[in-house]
Image: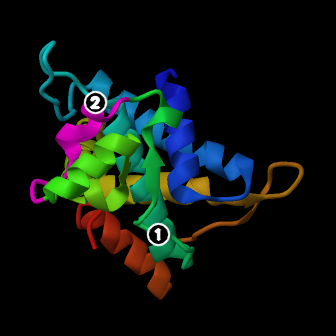
Amino acid sequence: MNERELFNTLHDEILDYVEDDLLLRCANWGYEVHQLLLEHKMYIMQEEEQGEQSSPFIYAVATAVIVGEFAKHAYNDYYSDETNLLLDELDLEFEQVSGFLNKDIDKDRFEMLKEINGVSLQDIWDTICVWKKDIHKSLVKIYKQQDKKDPDEYIFQSLSKIFELTDEDDIVISSFSGHGTERESSAYAYISNGFQY
């Protein structure tokens, strides 16, 4: 499975939206963020036997969680942080993701996850939170270098665009117009707090 397919599959699994076009926009946002971080050499490294490398898996998971949490704040969309991921479906082995497990994971739980070749979001939640915070910090730095006056606003607009509704002529019929509502303010605060609650 290539990186693009990995992002598409993980966003589909984690977000569980019915609309294929919406899922594709979500996955594209995550993939583009990952590529931007790679381009600017602003990504967290994972230690492996072959040396340190960036992990598309954890970036795909973290960006899917960011989109889901943003939608929960902005639109009151349903989002669950208890998704189970079967690694066979992602062409991954447990050893490739075991370094992302919470440090306090129970030994029996570890062995069970290894046996089923899977993880739940809760099993890797500590890592997800670190990655989300780092993604935010990196995006802010990149956007400041690009002379964006308010990087958080730029991030807010890019996430909002995912959920814009358009008619058959691609004319926007529903989108945020600012931070006037409580939900919009909550979504902006989520971003400005480093994608943390």
Work out whether residue 141 can be spotted: no
Sequence order check: which comes first, mark 2 or mark 1? 1
Amino acid type at circle 1 is Ser
Q: Report the side of 133 relative to 31 (left or right).
A: left
Crowdedness of circle 1 by 10 Å Cα count: few (<14), some, many (20+)? some
Q: What quarter of the picture does the C terminus occupy? A: bottom left
Amino acid type at circle 2 is Gln
Question: Is 103 covered by the magenta stretch?
Answer: yes
Residue under label 1 = 80
- Residue beneath the point at 72% across and 48% down: 20
- Residue beneath the point at 41% across and 72% down: 187
What element does badge 2 sit on? Answer: helix
Q: Nearer the viewer, residue 190 or 15?
A: 15
Question: Is 102 covered by the magenta stretch?
Answer: yes
| Whole-percent x, y for residue 140 in the image | 25, 48
Distance from the alpha carbon under mark 2 to that under mark 1: 24 Å
Q: Residue 118's mark?
A: none
- Residue beneath the point at 81% across and 49% down: 170
Work out whether residue 123 can be spotted: yes
What element does badge 1 sit on? Answer: loop
Residue under label 2 = 96
> In the picture, residue 191 is in which quadrant?
bottom left
Q: Report the side of 170 relative to 5 (left or right).
A: right
In the rendered image, the vertical position of residue 112 relative to residue 195, given as above or below? above
Crowdedness of circle 2 by 10 Å Cα count: few (<14), some, many (20+)? few
| Whole-percent x, y for residue 130 in the image | 18, 52
Q: Nearer the viewer, residue 153 or 36?
A: 36
- Residue beneath the point at 31% across and 35% down: 94
Which stretch is magenta?
Answer: 93-104
Q: Report the side of 17 relative to 113 (left or right).
A: right
